[in-house]
Image: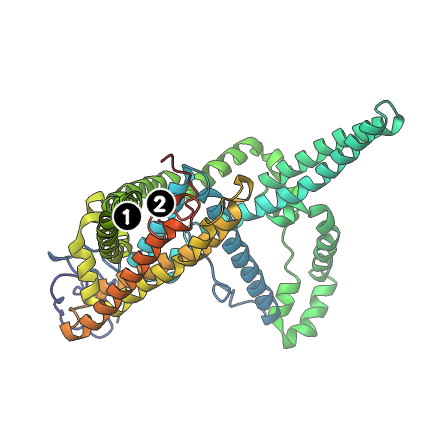
């Protein structure tokens, strides 16, 4: 007889809560307990989140998950390839959208907020895949952008033909024919793009006239296989060996679920054409959580700029000075920048988890993270420094505004993994029951300081190379916005 979960004693969490002291171990569970696992109360100490609190959000569906167990293996393989394709499209769309937003002045704060949300999701849930925030929305947006871009090619081609004919002979019949063809084609293609957007914006919606003959042929074949004449024949032959395969072959989805004209006709008959489009756009924008990401990013930008103001200003002042003053201020700037850069990666994660502006200045929390996970803290700081060094090369020459999104893609690809690593480090420090020994911490602290001073010296020398000069030292893509293409006025 199973125990009643309501009457069962409280169960301990699977992982201890990160506090200033070791978590107390409650008595073991009784045999047969199947109730929920409540969290232990958070004692005083490190104000970290409970690792058992589930984090809701949009994370990717990996190719090896959610395969229907009742389906035959050929269709499971097709499902796996479909999910792999969806995952690749989502990753491509995520990087592309972040790169475009990273070069726009205000949307840069959204990208920084997204990076912080990635780290905080991993730190809260303990799952790396939780860091792919907005993955489903990015996949949908990638399909819309790519499909729309491809559909605009015929309009561009028709416009080129019409302009060429008008330049040669504006009053000829050929020019007038090209003009009518251009206007008619533009109207039809724009209507086609709007219809594809309404149906979900997947690539197959943009190319449904090419896909429809094959898809309808498969649908008719499945309908015939599920008819009264053919289904018993399949059940008595192939069904004896592979009954699941017969069920999959005879399963024909309604046309109104996948064919674009049928989808629009279904909404027209129900009278929900405009209300469905309105609700779909509104739900899509709500799922992006743009106000939260913007507010998170702009607060982190302001707090991080406060941390970097003194070190970077000292290095900039050194560039304006001469002789002994330049050497002294340069040395002080390098030392202060190295110390600040050592703690900033984990302080930003702590701020994102706590969602408090003051948490960005709680140095005790960052030090406690190092004491409990020194090796992982060293990996985080080292990855932050190493991944950001090559990106300074993209700041040597001024880039045309039309091409800014291309180097921004490189910035996103280098900076995004750092946020995954920092969230992973914060999580393991949070779950640690006690601090590491002093003899174990000191070697990692020494190596970490060496990396920090090397990184600070490299940043200081970059003022002679980057096109923005000494003022460009404020463009710290490792801690601020990831694509800092800004021309400072001083």
Q: Could one spot residue 3 in this view of the protein?
A: no
Q: Secondary structure at mark 2?
A: helix
- Which is nearer the eye, 199 or 386? 386
Q: How packed is label 1: few (under 14 Cα within 10 Å), some, or many (20 or more)? A: many
The disc, 1 or 2, on the residue closer to the chain's N-terminal end is 1
Image position, residue 234 (x, y; %): 70, 69
Mark count: 2
Label number found at residue 257? none
Q: Is residue 46 visible?
A: yes
Residue lying at the far bottom of the rendered structure: 241
Query: Which quarter shows the N terminus?
Result: bottom left
Question: Is 332 above or below relative to 233?
Answer: above
Q: Position of residue 341 (x, y in %)?
A: 27, 55
Q: Which residue is mark 2?
A: 470
In the displayed structure, does residue 431 sit left or right of residue 220? left
The percent coordinates of residue 8 (x first, y second) are 18, 65
Circle 1 residue: 315
68 or 367: nearer the viewer: 367
Q: Position of residue 49 (x, y in %)?
A: 23, 55
Q: As drawn, which residue projects farthest toward the front?
A: 323
Label 1 secondary element: helix
The answer to whether 79 is drawn above or below residue 360 in the figure is below
Identify the coloring.
rainbow
Image quarter of the C terminus: top left
Residue in the picture at 74% in, 63% down:
229
Image-quadrant location for residue 217: bottom right
Find out whether the residues at labels 1 and 2 contact each other: C-beta distance under 8 Å. Answer: yes
Gap between marks 1 and 2, in whole Å?
8 Å
Asked if residue 327 is positioned above or below residue 313 in the image, the reply reads below
Count neighbours of disc 2 (C-alpha within 10 A) and say few if under 14, some if 14 to 19, many if 20 or more. many
Name the residue nearer the viewer: 271 or 415.
415
């Amino acid at each position: 007889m199973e125990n009643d979960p309501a009457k069962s004693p409280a169960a301990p969490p699977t992982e201890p809560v990160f506090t200033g002291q070791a978590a107390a171990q409650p008595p073991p569970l009784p045999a047969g307990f199947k109730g929920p696992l409540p969290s232990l109360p958070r004692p005083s100490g490190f104000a970290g989140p409970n690792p058992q609190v589930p984090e809701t959000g949009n994370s990717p569906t990996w190719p090896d998950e959610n395969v229907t167990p009742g389906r035959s293996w050929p269709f499971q393989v097709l499902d796996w390839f479909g999910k792999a394709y969806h995952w690749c499209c989502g990753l491509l769309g995520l990087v592309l959208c972040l790169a475009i937003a990273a070069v726009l002045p205000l949307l840069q704060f959204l990208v920084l907020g997204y990076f912080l949300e990635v780290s905080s999701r991993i730190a809260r849930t303990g799952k790396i895949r939780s860091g792919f925030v907005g993955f489903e929305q990015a996949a949908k947006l990638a399909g819309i952008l790519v499909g729309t871009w491809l559909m605009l090619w015929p309009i561009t081609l028709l416009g080129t033909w019409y302009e060429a004919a008008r330049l040669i002979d504006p009053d000829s019949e050929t020019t007038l024919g090209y003009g009518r063809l251009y206007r008619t084609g533009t109207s039809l293609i724009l209507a086609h793009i709007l219809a594809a957007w309404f149906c979900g914006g997947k690539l197959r919606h943009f190319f449904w006239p090419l896909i429809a003959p094959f898809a309808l042929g498969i649908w008719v074949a499945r309908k015939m296989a599920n008819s009264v004449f053919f289904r018993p024949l399949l059940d008595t032959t192939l069904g004896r060996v592979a009954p699941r395969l017969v069920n999959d072959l005879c399963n024909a989805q309604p046309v109104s679920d996948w064919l674009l004209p049928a989808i629009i006709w279904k909404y027209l008959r129900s009278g929900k054409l405009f209300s469905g489009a309105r609700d779909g756009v509104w739900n899509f924008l709500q799922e992006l959580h743009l106000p939260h990401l913007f507010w998170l990013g702009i607060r982190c930008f302001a707090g991080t700029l406060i941390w970097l103001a003194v070190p970077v200003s000292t290095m900039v002042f050194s560039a304006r000075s001469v002789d002994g003053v330049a050497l002294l201020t340069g040395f002080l700037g390098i030392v202060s920048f190295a110390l600040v850069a050592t703690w900033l990666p984990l302080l930003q994660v702590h701020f994102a988890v706590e969602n408090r502006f003051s948490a960005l200045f709680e140095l005790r929390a960052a030090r406690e993270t190092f004491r409990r996970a020194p090796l992982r803290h060293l990996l985080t700081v080292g990855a932050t420094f190493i991944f950001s060094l090559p990106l300074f090369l993209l700041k040597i020459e001024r880039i045309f505004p039309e091409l800014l999104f291309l180097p921004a893609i490189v910035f996103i690809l280098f900076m995004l993994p750092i946020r995954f690593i920092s969230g992973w480090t914060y999580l393991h420090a949070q779950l640690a029951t006690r601090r590491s020994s002093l003899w174990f911490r000191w070697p990692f602290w020494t190596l970490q300081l060496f990396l920090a001073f090397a990184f600070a010296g490299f940043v200081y020398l970059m003022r002679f190379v980057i096109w923005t000069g000494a003022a460009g030292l404020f463009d710290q893509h490792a801690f601020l916005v990831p694509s800092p293409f800004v021309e400072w006025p001083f």
